[in-house]
Image: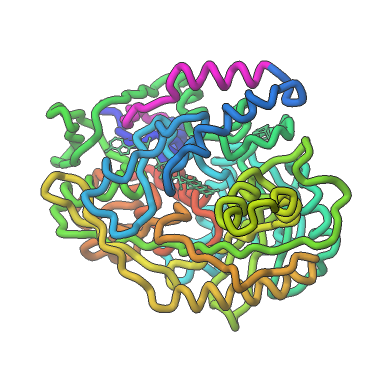
Amino acid sequence: MLPDLVIGSGPAGVSVATALLARGRRVVMLDGGKDLPPEAEARRGALAATPPERWREDQRTAWQAGQFDAAGSEVRRFGTGYAMEPAEATFAATDGLALRASLAVGGLSNYWGAAMLPYRQSDMGGWPISEADLAPHYAAVLDFVPMAGVTDALAPLFPAVPMAGRSPIPPGPQARRALSRHYPSDRFHLGLARQAVASGCTGCGMCLHGCPWRLIWSARQQVARLRQQEGFTHRPGPPVLSISETGNAATVHLADGTSVEGARVYLAAGVLGTAPILLRALDLPDLVMRDSAQGFLPTLQLARTDAAPDRMPFHTLPQMFAELTDPAVSPQTVHAQLYGWNEYYERDLRTNYGSKLPFAGPLWRTLARRLVVAQIFLHSDHSASARLALAPDGRLQAHVLKNPETWGQLKRAATAMGGHLRRAGLQPLVFALRAGAPGSGFHAGSTLPMTRNPGPRQSDPLGRPVGRQRLHVVDASVLPAIPATTITLAVMANAHRIGAYNPG
Ligand SMILES: Cc1cc2nc3c(=O)[nH]c(=O)nc-3n(C[C@H](O)[C@H](O)[C@H](O)COP(=O)(O)OP(=O)(O)OC[C@H]3O[C@@H](n4cnc5c(N)ncnc54)[C@H](O)[C@@H]3O)c2cc1C
Ligand code: SF4
């Protein structure tokens, strides 16, 4: 019997593969195969072998240099950019779209921020699946993904993922102070962030440069676990170009001219990896991708905290989540991730204002220690989208379709959130609100949205495009919309749901 083929080893790919194996299917996983270069792995190992209190300053600086040296919106971790493709590898023209693809084992989860929330039923209006349909699959995914957090003010909003029995990464002094001052409101909910981080955090503060202990989960870890399982084969290699199907088999066509046959294909190449495959396989002129717009609202915590936020132990992942459920602002949830001190704040202040106030070094340091930045996300209804087509050379050609309401909506959300944050002792600097470029939040998808009665450019609730029986698209491409709350946990649950279903 033919195996099932999974294209992609990111969060969506490992989730669908885990579900298929649990059903007794044989699975061959194909991906771009890029992995952490050996010299970077050696640097990581050396750091992890020493407790962070004993690291030398030059070791810290060297670990951070890779990211600090990265150009523009490029992201690096572990000192290398291997897990994020440069714009020109994916696009003939980006038109300002900041989303990037990955050809790595584990995909973009090698670099992600690890913030995790499920979707809320109220943000899934008109979807062919419900929060209840996803609930068992959140549980299945969280069997292999660690989730740090607690039951707090956010719990009633997200019943699909109960937090009982979980432990948080110890919050920093800024979050401790804000949370101790916050009082409940039915339109604003502030709580500790939930992150995909395993227990044992040393508080070394290197989260934005790659965790030396690999405590920040990446799908690469699940690929390694699946490799130990019978019936699973990992086949890194040339990229997939297209997929065809006959009556009882599906064929994946690779860039080197070879092909692989399977019973079914589960396509999880990430939104930008999946789009060109779909454009070729379905012979479509274009696809429209939806984005969840993001903006940055700086706030100042003027009161002193009980400890310096830049003294170990501390972490630089999101410290708090804030959810605005105010119909006067949006019918959908507005989500924010609040970041306490990190080593970028002082650098950014110096870069932007240093030439005007050259002797103000200590001021920037003091200011940086008081900053808490809210990264605000909007639902895709309020955000830009992008038309994706194939350029003659096979890369993508993007055309950004701006949404005239995005900036106004972002300002309304920041003003309303800012009012609530002020009561938690965080003074919002709404005049300094900054919008991110489309795609820069990496919460994007919906190119082939699931619907009950699919037409062209849509898929059925099992991610199958019209006319295809053996091709299931399982990554964010099939989300009917992009809610503001974090994307990856819901994508994983949905991929697991599709893989768990026995189509006969
Ligand atoms: C800096 C950053 C921070 C982020 N922070 C968060 C966060 O805090 N919370 C959150 O929810 N999300 C976050 N994200 C988004 C998150 O990383 C993605 O949602 C997630 O990785 C998507 O998973 P995926 O499996 O669909 O695709 P990807 O992770 O992109 O994986 C794609 C896979 O497909 C393979 N592939 C691609 N093209 C081909 C091809 N043609 N042929 C064969 N294989 C192919 C790749 O090798 C890879 O294995 C962040 C992303 C970034 C970059
Ligand atoms: S602070 Fe961040 S990088 Fe350091 S151990 Fe904890 S999770 Fe890893």
Quadrant of the rendered structure where residue 126 is? bottom left
**Residue depicted at 48% across the width and 34% down the height:** 219
Q: Is residue 380 above or below residue 142?
A: below
Q: How many marks?
A: 0
- Is residue 364 among the parts visible in the rendering? yes
Which is nearer the eye, 421 or 463?
421
Determine the quadrant in which ligand 2 lies. top right
The x and y percentages for residue 403 are: 38, 74
**Residue depicted at 65% across the width and 21% down the height:** 48
Quadrant where the C terminus is found in the figure: top left
Residue placed farthest to the bottom in the image? 328
Q: Does the magenta stretch include residue 45?
A: yes
Q: Is residue 474 magenta?
A: no
The x and y percentages for residue 338 are: 66, 56
Quadrant where the N terminus is found in the figure: top left
**Residue depicted at 70% across the width and 22% down the height:** 56
Left or right, residue 59 beside residue 128:
right
